[in-house]
């Protein structure tokens, strides 16, 4: 939140007190409720809000509702997401003096509706503000400074990678498209009122479900509204009812993992942010021999132990000699700057981490590139959830040793982390192979899917369709209930 910057840089004395902090009595505060000096008390601190009048998205009238009063309750209702201590620090006048007997400070009432967002106001048929606040539907607000514009979506639910919700932002040619995706999808879609730089910053207050998208203005113009509504603006629908939205990715590197698998690093445009939650995939789309082809791929981190990369996507792709899309991808050029392009969708898929919360034994059964969704799950289970005493076991099925992806990394992690173990099962091993041989079957699962007394187990499966279906069937025969199983499929 940096609306204050233009003022602080301008050298203006925002409080009118030349840097001194004073104690303000209730009587003094109540007198300061009109321009040129309007003071507001928020949680015991007094601010001179006059310089903000011209920038408040709800206009001067809304701001003046709190002038000369305790505005804490009103502020919390309308701008819960804003950290006013840092935002208003340049306007801090001082503290409230302890109250004298019999004096009571007027409080703004929390039932006052949120500020008007003018061009962005909901249609006349929408429920009144108080009801809108309670209906569980996300809503948005905005504010601006001389140099920036901030869109704030208040999701009214926790926004967390653990519940698999995520934010997807696309800013292209003055059109802002922000979608908040979980099981439900909320979308803001606007032609912005003014020109902005093609870069965005997203800040998420996960626990309160507040997502702030910050844009930089190209000129120091004051916007009277945020923009003009485009298709599906301000809609809240089931995620599966939204068509995938593609952005233009550039291939910036291609790294060999083994003899037939590569990691493609895809750079997204400057105005695009994709948070792909663990276990979700994206679609790649391209025109191959005049046919539009789409294939799903599951982003991985740069390595098993790397912290998640925010902007670029890393895709581990097995190249099939007769595979149309994977062969097309492997032939794309990387060396030129910029490299070849491929269209990338937002996150898709139905995996949720919620059922894993209390799990004591997590079994991951992967075949070939079925490893991809497991990689981030392994990182999460062994790093981020490390306070939970959970054992994570990867059973990794391949033909030969040369097909095992990230073997060095997996072995290293197992050596470093007693809560993770990996076992390789090969269907066509060399004579010297000392590990398990064969394919997935009932006897193998009986042997490895242990269910100690008092344990809570969960099984994730990913691989070719035949492998996935057989493994699920066997796991059910072995006593696993449907809610204890997840298959990563298209
Ligand atoms: C949800 C989901 C996530 C996926 N994530 C990844 C990923 O992260 N990395 C990745 O490499 N792939 C992934 N895939 C598979 C991927 O989408 C493509 O199917 C794969 O790249 C082959 O596409 P293609 O056009 O090259 O092959 P196609 O032209 O569609 O198929 C040609 C031939 O390739 C072989 N083939 C294709 N797919 C498979 C398979 N799954 N198993 C065995 N043989 C096969 C067969 O011989 C087939 O006849 C995922 C699939 C799903 C459903």
Image (spheres, grey):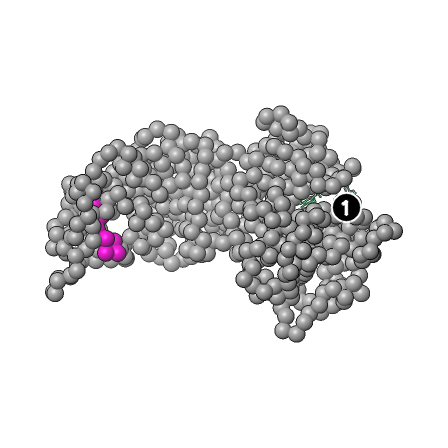
Depicted 8 relative to depicted 369: above or below: above
Q: Residue at x 37, y 32 (%)?
A: 217
The image position of residue 293, as x and y in percent, is 67, 37
Question: Dividing the image into four equal quarters, which quarter contains ligand 1?
Answer: top right
Left/right placement of residue 44 relative to residue 127 reads left
Q: Residue at x 61, y 28 (%)?
A: 339
The image position of residue 214, as x and y in percent, is 40, 40
Mark 1: secondary structure: helix
What secondary structure predominates along the stretch shown in magenta? strand
Which contiguous range is marked in magenta? 42-49
* Total number of numbered discs in the rendering: 1
Is any atom of residue 71 visible in this view? no
Q: Is residue 403 magenta?
A: no
Q: Quadrant of residue 2?
A: top left
Q: Quadrant of residue 301?
A: top right
Is any atom of residue 13 visible in this view? yes
Q: Residue at x 76, y 54 (%)?
A: 424
Q: Say which of 217 and 117 sits in front.
A: 217
Left/right placement of residue 87 relative to residue 30 reads right
Q: Residue furthest front?
A: 416
Q: Residue at x 56, y 46 (%)?
A: 308
The image position of residue 220, as x and y in percent, is 32, 30
In the picture of the structure, the residue carrying the numbered disc 1 is 403
Q: Residue furthest right?
A: 431
The image position of residue 180, as x and y in percent, is 48, 48
Quadrant of the snapshot with the N terminus: top left
Q: Is residue 48 magenta?
A: yes
């Amino acid at each position: 939140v940096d609306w204050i910057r233009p003022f602080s840089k301008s050298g203006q004395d925002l409080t009118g007190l030349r840097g001194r902090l004073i104690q303000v009595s209730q009587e003094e505060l109540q007198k300061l409720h009109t321009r040129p000096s309007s003071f507001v008390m928020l949680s015991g601190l007094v601010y001179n809000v006059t310089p903000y009048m011209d920038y408040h998205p709800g206009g001067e009238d809304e701001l003046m509702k709190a002038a000369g009063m305790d505005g804490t309750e009103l502020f919390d209702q309308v701008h819960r997401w804003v950290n006013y201590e840092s935002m208003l620090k340049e306007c801090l006048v001082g503290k409230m003096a302890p109250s004298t007997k019999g004096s009571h400070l007027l409080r703004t009432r929390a039932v006052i509706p949120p500020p008007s967002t003018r061009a962005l106001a909901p249609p006349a048929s929408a429920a009144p503000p108080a009801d809108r606040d309670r209906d569980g539907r996300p809503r948005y607000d905005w504010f601006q400074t001389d140099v920036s514009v901030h869109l704030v979506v208040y999701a009214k639910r926790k926004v967390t990678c653990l519940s698999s919700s995520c934010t997807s932002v696309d800013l292209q040619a003055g059109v802002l498209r922000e979608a908040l995706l979980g099981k439900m999808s909320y979308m803001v879609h606007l032609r912005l009122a003014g020109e902005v730089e093609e870069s965005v910053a997203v800040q998420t207050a996960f626990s309160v479900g507040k997502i702030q998208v910050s844009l930089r203005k190209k000129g120091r113009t004051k916007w009277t509204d945020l923009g003009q509504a485009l298709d599906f603006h301000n809609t809240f629908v089931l995620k599966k009812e939204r068509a995938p939205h593609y952005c233009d990715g550039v291939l910036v590197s291609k790294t060999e993992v083994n003899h037939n698998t590569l990691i493609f690093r895809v750079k997204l445009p400057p105005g695009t942010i994709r948070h792909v939650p663990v276990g979700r995939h994206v679609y790649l789309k391209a025109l191959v021999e005049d046919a539009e082809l789409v294939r799903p791929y599951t982003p991985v981190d740069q390595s098993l132990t790397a912290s998640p990369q925010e902007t670029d996507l890393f895709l581990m792709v097995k190249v099939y000699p007769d595979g149309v899309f994977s062969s097309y991808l492997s032939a794309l050029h990387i060396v030129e700057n910029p490299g070849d392009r491929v269209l990338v969708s937002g996150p898709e898929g139905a995996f949720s981490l919620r059922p894993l919360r209390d799990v004591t034994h997590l079994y991951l059964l992967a075949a070939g590139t079925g490893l991809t969704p497991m990689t981030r799950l392994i990182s999460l289970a062994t790093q981020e959830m490390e306070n939970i005493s959970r054992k994570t076991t990867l059973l990794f099925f391949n033909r030969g040793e040369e097909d095992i992806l990230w073997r060095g990394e997996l072995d290293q992690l197992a050596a470093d982390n007693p809560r993770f173990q990996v076992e390789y099962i090969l269907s066509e091993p060399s004579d010297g192979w000392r590990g398990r041989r064969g394919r997935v079957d009932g006897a193998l699962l009986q042997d490895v899917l242990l269910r100690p007394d008092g344990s809570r187990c969960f099984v994730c499966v990913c691989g070719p369709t035949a492998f996935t279906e057989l493994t699920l069937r066997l796991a059910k025969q072995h006593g696993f209930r449907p809610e204890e199983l997840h298959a990563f499929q298209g």
